[in-house]
């Protein structure tokens, strides 16, 4: 798939992408030596999955630091971070992580990365969300378009029984 140029990428966004990458690298430096101390069986069962999640997160964060990026990179990074958090919880429940302090350290690092990803997503999708809200508010100004209050959108049903029927739909905003 061709990458899309980010003409609106600011220096602050690029710096935030570098900060996310640095935090992921810090987590890898912290976690990988600990995983190496696990038994071989534990390393193979869950340690490899955790290491692969962190490696994939590094790749996706690297994509954010260049002038060309895909909007899917930030969403995929967020999904991978959620998977990592799940692996951390499983590792704790199985006893691979010793003590709540170890678990809280891992989770704290992942949560911090998650907050940074959320901030970056606001930058990436901020203009698009504002444009969509204005578009919804302006519907109904021409022809027979229904007037739709802010926060409510509509879609055209294309099923066999109701072709062309306009149905109300709530718009989700985060």
Image: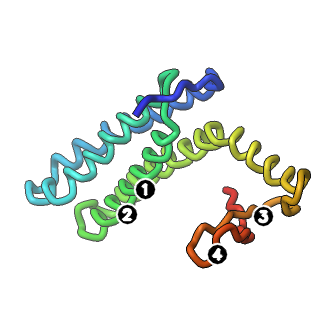
State how far apart marks 2 and 1 are (Cα). Answer: 19 Å
Mark 3 or 2: in front is 3
Quick one: quadrant of the C terminus? Answer: bottom right
Q: Residue at coordinates 79% horizontally, 61% vertically from top-left? A: 151
Q: Earlier in the sequence, mark 3 or mark 1?
A: 1
Residue under numbered circle 3: 152
State how far apart marks 3 and 2 are (Cα). Answer: 44 Å
Residue under numbered circle 2: 100
- Secondary structure of the residue carrying tag 1 is helix
Residue under numbered circle 1: 82
State how far apart marks 4 and 2 are (Cα). Answer: 55 Å
Is 102 in front, or is 66? 66
- Secondary structure of the residue carrying tag 2 is helix
Is 14 in front, or is 29? 14
State the image coordinates of residue 38 (x, y, percent, origin top left): 15, 54
Is residue 7 positioned above or below 17 on the image? above
Mark 3 or 1: in front is 3
């Amino acid at each position: 798939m061709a990458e899309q140029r980010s003409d609106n990428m600011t220096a602050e966004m690029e710096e935030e992408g570098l900060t996310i990458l640095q935090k992921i690298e810090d987590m890898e430096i912290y976690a990988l030596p600990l995983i190496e101390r696990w038994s071989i069986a534990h390393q193979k069962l869950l340690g490899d999955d955790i290491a692969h999640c962190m490696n994939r997160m590094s790749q996706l964060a690297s994509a954010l630091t260049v002038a060309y990026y895909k909007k899917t990179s930030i969403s995929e990074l967020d999904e991978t971070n959620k998977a990592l958090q799940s692996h951390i919880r499983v590792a704790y429940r199985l006893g691979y992580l010793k003590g709540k302090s170890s678990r809280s350290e891992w989770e704290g690092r992942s949560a911090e990365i998650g907050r940074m990803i959320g901030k970056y997503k606001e930058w990436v999708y901020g203009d698009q969300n504002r444009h969509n809200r204005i578009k919804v508010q302006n519907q109904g100004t021409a022809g027979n378009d229904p007037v739709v209050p802010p926060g409510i959108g509509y879609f055209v049903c294309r099923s066999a029984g109701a072709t062309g029927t306009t149905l109300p739909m709530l718009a989700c905003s985060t």
